[in-house]
Amino acid sequence: MPRHRPSPAFLAAQVRWCLGRGVPPEIAEDLVHEAWIQAESTWDPSRGAWEAYMQRIVRNAGIDWWRAQRRHAPLDDGLRLVSPEDGTRRERAEARQEALLDALGPEDRAVFSAWVLQKTLGKGQVRAEDVGGSLGLDAKGFENLRTGREDLHELEGCVQALAHAHRAPGCRGSSFRDTFGSPRRP
């Protein structure tokens, strides 16, 4: 006959503690039951309240259960193994980039180099005259190139907005020509 009969609320709180730590429900109930049996057989009234003693046993049992699970669980350090295919993909991408750069003409390569230089160093650190000079352009020519690029970006934004509006629900046109009409011919 047990000496202590804990309240159902106390036992439920112990099971909830285990569940909150990720212990499966059936194992949590077993841990609490075994802790009750152990507390009944080993409790010394001079050491404190029986409920506190049982609560400590439940917590220790839950920790021991997790340690046992950790010993048997496969290690996952979160690192992704690099396969040989990843290396070849990277090499192929680099080869494609090299081929694209080789396909550029001398003027295009100079413009691209100037763009990379400006992006790498940042605005304000490279003067337009220096970049324009490396392209064989004076400051005005480089400024025209820069404003032309800005105009192109603005035009691309307009085209994207038109395409988005064309795809919007309620748009009746089925093609660019239906929506905006045929281009005018001189």
Image (spheres, helix red, strand yellow):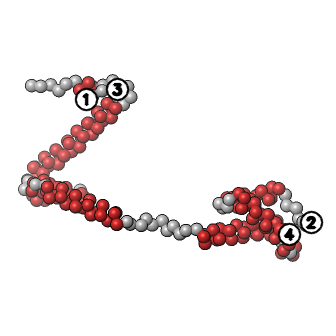
Distance CA(mark 2)–CA(mark 1): 88 Å
Of the numbered discs 2 and 1, the one sitting upstream in the chain is 2
Asked whether the residues under the numbered discs 2 and 4 touch, taking CB atoms below 8 Å apart as contact, a structural biologist would say no
Count every numbered label the image shows and give the total: 4
Secondary structure beneath dot 2 equals loop
Asked whether the residues under the numbered discs 2 and 1 touch, taking CB atoms below 8 Å apart as contact, a structural biologist would say no
Measured as percent of width and height from the top left, residue 81 is found at 42, 67
Distance CA(mark 2)–CA(mark 3): 81 Å
Numbered tag placed on residue 1 in the rendering: 2
Measured as percent of width and height from the top left, residue 38 is found at 81, 70
Distance CA(mark 3)–CA(mark 4): 77 Å
Instruction: Look at label 1 and name its amino acid.
Output: Phe
Task: Quadrant for residue 157, please give it.
Answer: top left
For the residue pair 1 and 123, the one nearer the viewer reads as 1
Q: Which of the two discs, 2 and 4, sits closer to the camera?
A: 2
Distance CA(mark 4)–CA(mark 1): 83 Å
Disc 3 marks which residue?
A: 171
Q: Look at the picture and state if 43 lies above or below 131.
A: below
Of the numbered discs 1 and 3, the one sitting upstream in the chain is 3
Instruction: Look at label 3 and name its amino acid.
Output: Cys
Name the residue located 64 percent from the left edge and 71 percent from the top edge. Answer: 67
The crowd level at tag 3 (other Cα within 10 Å; few <14, some 14-19, many 20+) is few
Disc 1 marks which residue?
A: 176
Horizontal relation, residue 38 to residue 124: left or right: right
The crowd level at tag 4 (other Cα within 10 Å; few <14, some 14-19, many 20+) is some
Instruction: Look at label 4 and name its amino acid.
Output: Glu
Measured as percent of width and height from the top left, residue 6 is found at 85, 61
Disc 4 marks which residue?
A: 40
Horizontal relation, residue 136 to residue 99: left or right: left
Of the numbered discs 3 and 4, the one sitting upstream in the chain is 4
